[in-house]
Amino acid sequence: MSCSRPATSSPVEDWSTRLRRAAITDVYELRVCVEVGAAELAARRRTPEDIDALHTALAGRRAAVRVGDAEFVAADIALHEAVVAAAHNPVLTGLFTEFLPVLRTRLLDLVALLGLRTADGPDDGDAGHADLVDAVVRGDSAAAGRAARDELDRTLALLDRL
């Protein structure tokens, strides 16, 4: 009796490679799965330092509206990183950190694909991000989860129209 596993015809694709190949819709579906729970945990676990970081990140996102796409995407990601950090779950933080390079690339693609922003236009996502920060700060986990889901679902709906 042999304990060896049968040979496969192709190597198993590692997580990083799979993420790089992911379609933008796949990335957003994963974000819903990860970030809604992170927002709920953040609302329950946030510290005064997390609250400061969230307010700083929201202000940074607002300031980045008038700059280039790369800077805006970096500021948007920083806000979402602050929410994940406030969840105080090292496994969740590690997963999100692993996911960041692909998220950055896909967000840049998304901004270009959907024409979501212009240097002189409004930030359509500001209200949703403000709601998310407010809910986490207030400690309302249900509202934080809804705010995260609503913002991500809004983008998924735009993608569905393509």
Image (cartoon, rainbow, N blue to C red):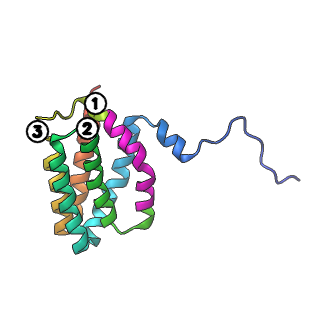
Left or right side of 102 for 54: left
Which span is picked out in magenta? 93-109
Q: Is residue 143 visible?
A: no
Instruction: Please tell me in which quadrant of the rendered image residue 94 appears.
Output: bottom left
For the stretch drawn in magenta, the main secondary structure is helix
Left or right side of 111 for 122: left
Residue that carries the numbered disc 1 in the rendered image: 112
Dot 1 amino acid type: Ala
Near-viewer residue (23 or 2)? 23
Residue that carries the numbered disc 2 in the rendered image: 69
Q: In the image, is residue 106 part of the stretch drawn in magenta? A: yes
Report x, y in % for residue 88: 36, 69
Dot 2 amino acid type: Asp
Q: Is 101 located above or below residue 141 in the figure?
A: above
Residue that carries the numbered disc 3 in the rendered image: 122
Secondary structure category for the residue under label 3: loop
Q: Are marks 2 and 1 in contact (CB under 8 Å)?
A: yes
Disc 3 from disc 2: Cα separation? 14 Å
Report the residue at 33% width, 54% height from top: 35
**Mark sitting on residue 12:** none
